[in-house]
Image (cartoon, rainbow, N blue to C red):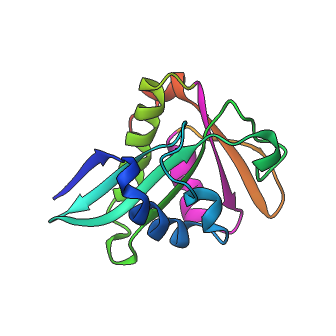
Amino acid sequence: MVSFRASTADDFPVIERFARLASSNPAHYSERWGRMGDFGVIAESHCQVVGAAWARLFAWSDLRDPLGSPQFPELAIAVDGTFRGQGIGTDLLRELVAAAERLGYSALDLLVERSNLAAIAVYTKLGFKRIGGDARLWMRVTVSQRSNQQS
């Protein structure tokens, strides 16, 4: 049984751990976790953290791609390798998009390697659209349209 909870500033070690799985530049997504604009969802199974999805706002100078925007949080997500393929990542994304909606954001952004076809399929299924990119794709989901992406 997997449960989900909102992340807190005390979850820095969790965010740091999963940022190392999610990115070649983990500090970008974990440094000073808990600052204004940071929010996320933690997945737990039998009192063990098995995944995390989180988002943060970046200033223009800190965006990883010129297609990004300081008004849209950029997300990162990772699931422990032994728990992949069970739908946890999809559920984490749904929970994160719902959190973004509750917080009043109109969209979420992400950057994904073009070769990561499984992740791209999940993102597309949940309503993310390709904005651009070559080796890495910049994708965005409009949060207000989330309710149309239920399956």
Q: Position of residue 11 (x, y in %)?
A: 37, 56
Quarter of image, res 127: top right
* Residue at x 68% of width, y 45% of height: 139
Report the front residue among 117 and 68.
68
Query: Quarter of the image containing the C terminus?
Result: top left
Q: Position of residue 99 (x, y in %)?
A: 41, 33
134 displayed left or right of 108? right
* Residue at x 53% of width, y 28% of height: 143
Report the front residue among 112 and 33.
33
Q: Position of residue 29 (x, y in %)?
A: 59, 57
Query: Quarter of the image containing the N terminus?
Result: bottom left
Residue 129 to residue 3: above or below: above
* Residue at x 53% of width, y 65% of height: 19
Report the front residue among 121 and 17.
17
Whether the magenta-drawn stretch holds residue 28 is answered as no
Residue 97 to residue 139: above or below: above
Whether the magenta-drawn stretch holds residue 121 is answered as yes
Q: Position of residue 142 (x, y in %)?
A: 59, 29
Per the rendered image, the range of residues in magenta is: 106-126
